[in-house]
Amino acid sequence: MTYTSTPHVLVIETPGLGNRGYIAHDGAQAVVIDPQRDIDRVEHLLAEHGLVATHVVETHVHNDYVTGGLELALRHGAVYLVPADAAVPFEHTPVRDGDTFTVGGLVLTVVATPGHTPHHVSYSVERSEATDVYPGAIFTGGSMLYGAVGRPDLVKPELTEGLAHDQWHSVQRLAGRLANETYVYPTHGFGSFCAATQNEGTAGTIADERSNNPALTNDERDFVEETLAGLHVFPAYYAHMVPVNAAGPEPFDLSLPSPADPAELRARVERGEWVIDLRSREVFAAGHLRGSLSFDLDGPFIAYVGWLIPWGTPVTLLGETTEQVQAAHRELVRIGIDRPVAQAVGGPVFWTEDVAELSTTRRVDFGRLATIVADQPDTYVLDVRQHLEWEDGHIVGSHHLPFYQVPDRISEIPTDRPVYISCGSGYRAAAVISLLRATVVASGAPLENLVHVDDDWSNAPRTSLPIERGATPDRPAGWTWLESRGTARTFAPREGDEVGVGSTERANA
């Protein structure tokens, strides 16, 4: 059944970050919810549907991307709504629980929903001329997600447990005040690291959440315990997002970076800059520029680039096509890496004048690894997954080193025998191997002993590899924040840097 109170909603997907933004409208006037920085996507939809954006709203100051809300509001003369307790310094309209706003034929109501952040709000939207009793939609940001909630550990370690309790109460409040038929539109939860747990939902109502959301199916104590126990470490680049969003993001330029010739590419590699190869990891393994880094654009590109890059590192993009470079550039600006210093397209033969500058990477799957381990029981297998992944099951005798700690612990990795590096899908292992090789490229001695286990972890138990679970240690609430911030590095040129990835100076956030 379609209710007259239901607004029209346009969805703006950002799969790389696992987020959605929205445009809710009455056919003429619109409110834009949680827009990301590349607002041309929003403007194209507004123009396509003949809409005027009168309001732009934020559910919270975002941790995982740079907002486009301020620029969008300024460009369109829209009212910019931001939670009052966020206390941002730029021009906006502060909102509190119960505030209402009229957007053409829509009524927008603010609902306080702390938990993901202390200042978090949701927005209920319904048509003002509705003839039925059901509100149309609730835009929940990082509060109620599809079958999950936003994580409560992004603000400060000491606030984590309290915010987990707040999250339970906020979701309970939404379910208590909204009808079962209300459509739920979260910002996070589609692979976002801002979700407390991953889920498969892509649409739903309050009725669906009553059956599926742990904040509605568990009591408060069990919900808090299970939520805190299930938290993985989140990307290190989050340390930089809140300061940028709280200050008000600057405009950016999406024009194509300058082309780099082979000599420039080699110089940038040797200075310890990031020369990122956007091609598939399979193609990268078959031949790549020595010292370049493998971050397949078709995978979770931006999350892991942002996680591992020392902040401020000059970035050069290598792609098969100009379109691939442009797509990567757009992804980068979403997390505040505004301007790559250079780009090159084509392939390795265009990126070097000396075939000695090209490298390959040996690849095996878990089936082949099982044969190797059976023949050589002391085979060195390095598992670079997160702690909870490792504890859920790993190869007996393997070594664990979370991928985000690799730059600080390079000395622990053997150089005198093959090292087989695995992860959950092969993506992180490819990035780690390329990163390790890049650290020593200036010395002319790349790590040729690294072998990429390019396979999905689910295939490992189907082989003869022995699998065991790991012990789960007691961890205090907030440990994820501390571990994430502990690997938020800043860039330093390679000269004088023994590690060669970046300085050990940590980001302050």
Image (cartoon, grey):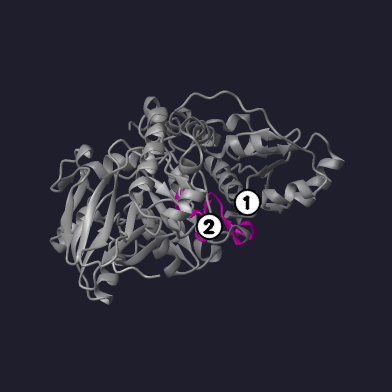
Number of the label disc, if any, that sits on residue 425: 1
Q: In this view, does 184 lie to the left or right of 227?
A: left
The residue shown at (42%, 33%) is: 164
The residue shown at (29%, 69%) is: 4
Residue 405: give x, y in percent of width and height. Answer: 53, 34
Q: Is mark 2 on a helix, strand or loop?
A: loop
Q: Which of 179 and 413 is in front in this view?
A: 179
Q: Which of 147 and 72 is in front in this view?
A: 147
Q: Few, some or many C-alpha atoms within 10 Å of disc 2 (few <14, some 14-19, many ≥20)?
A: some
Q: In this view, does 89 lie above or below 470?
A: below
Q: Is residue 202 above or below residue 390?
A: below
Q: Which of 171 and 53 is in front in this view?
A: 171
The reply to whether residue 275 is in sight is no
- The residue under label 2 is 299
Q: Few, some or many C-alpha atoms within 10 Å of disc 1 (few <14, some 14-19, many ≥20)?
A: some
Q: Residue at the far right: name it.
A: 375
Residue 299: give x, y in percent of width and height. Answer: 53, 57
Q: Is mark 1 on a helix, strand or loop?
A: loop
The reply to whether residue 239 is in sight is yes
Q: In which quarter of the image is residue 240?
A: top left
Q: In which quarter of the image is residue 385?
A: top right
Magenta stretch bounds: 283-303
Quarter of the picture containing the C terminus is top left
Residue 498: give x, y in percent of width and height. Answer: 49, 31
Asked if the magenta segment contains residue 187, the reply would be no
